[in-house]
Image (cartoon, rainbow, N blue to C red):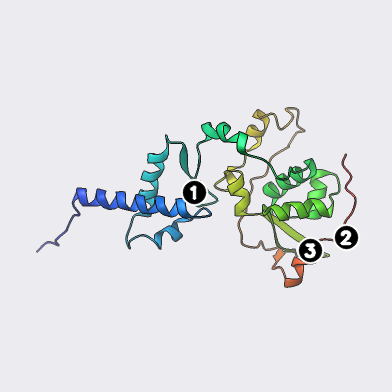
Amino acid sequence: MGETVSFQPESTAQTDLQQHMRLIEALLFAATEPLDEATLATRLPEGADIGAAIGALQADYATRGVNLVRLGGRWAFRTADDLAWILSRDAYETRKLSRAAMETLAIIAYHQPVTRAEIEDIRSVSISKGTLDVLLETGWVRLRGRRRAPGRPVTYGTTPAFLEHFGLDGVGDLPGLDELKGAGLLDGRLPPGFSVPMPNDDSALTPDEDPLETTDLSFAFPEPEPEHEG
């Protein structure tokens, strides 16, 4: 005899999907930070199709004042891009990053894992302890490990908070060379062979990195030095 195959009635499946959408909607609105699919799955009925529910919910919110977006591999509701200007009057910046800090942040994002000496080599100017301290305080940069090189310098990388703040799902979404040129952020007369590296923020240590030790959190930086901007 042939194997009996049972099918779930379409109306029941649709009802389940709508209920799962409502549960995910409630969880995301109540959450204080973006949630990943694994976390959402623990709060939904066993066997729920998380991907289908999120996809349907994202489509449902696509034309609303808030959209469902993925940030650093996690999901959250955010104001629609075309309405951001309405809220800008209520927004304020508690601390504006200096040019040195912004350049350092960009270098870390594109070149991570990277050491302070490597950052200085790329910028062709020394950076102060304070610049890196500010980036660590924002929560956008973290200590990754120590380079297996003389002096065992600390390596830096970006965090999920960096992705969330700049609306990125991953560092791979950072603009490439053509996009940077188009936005006027790079001079069109670049030297031959100039390229923008493909960023990678894999949390796993690279072969030339050692894990951090407890004391590294307190003694990660050398003594402060004056910053020299060219």
Q: Is residue 57 above or below residue 27?
A: above
Which picture quadrant has residue 6? bottom left
In 3D space, how far apart are the residues under numbered discs 3 and 1 (Cα atoms)? 33 Å
Q: Mark 3, residues whose alpha carbon is within 10 Å: few (<14), some, or many (≥20)?
A: some
Residue 171 visible from this viewpoint: no
- The residue wearing badge 1 is 76
For marks 2 and 1, give the CA distance: 40 Å
Q: Quadrant of the C terminus?
A: top right
Residue at image location 49% in from the left, 55% down from the top? 31
Q: Is residue 208 left or right of residue 77?
A: right
- In the depicted view, which residue is nearer to us: 63 or 149? 63
Cβ atoms under marks 2 and 1 closer than 8 Å: no
Q: Which residue is labeled 2 in the image?
A: 223
For residue 77, say whether it is visible.
yes
- Residue type, numbered disc 2: Glu
Question: In the image shown, does 4 or 60 lie closer to the viewer?
Answer: 60
Q: Could you tell me which residue is drawn at 83 percent across and 64 percent down? A: 150
The amino acid on which the numbered mark 3 sits, given as a three-letter code, is Ala
Inspect the image, locate mark 1, and give the three-letter code of the amino acid beneath it.
Ala
Whole-angstrom CA distance, mark 3 to mark 2, is 10 Å
Q: Which residue is mark 3?
A: 220
Residue 212 screen position, x and y as percent: 71, 68
Q: Residue 119: percent from the left, percent from the top?
A: 78, 50
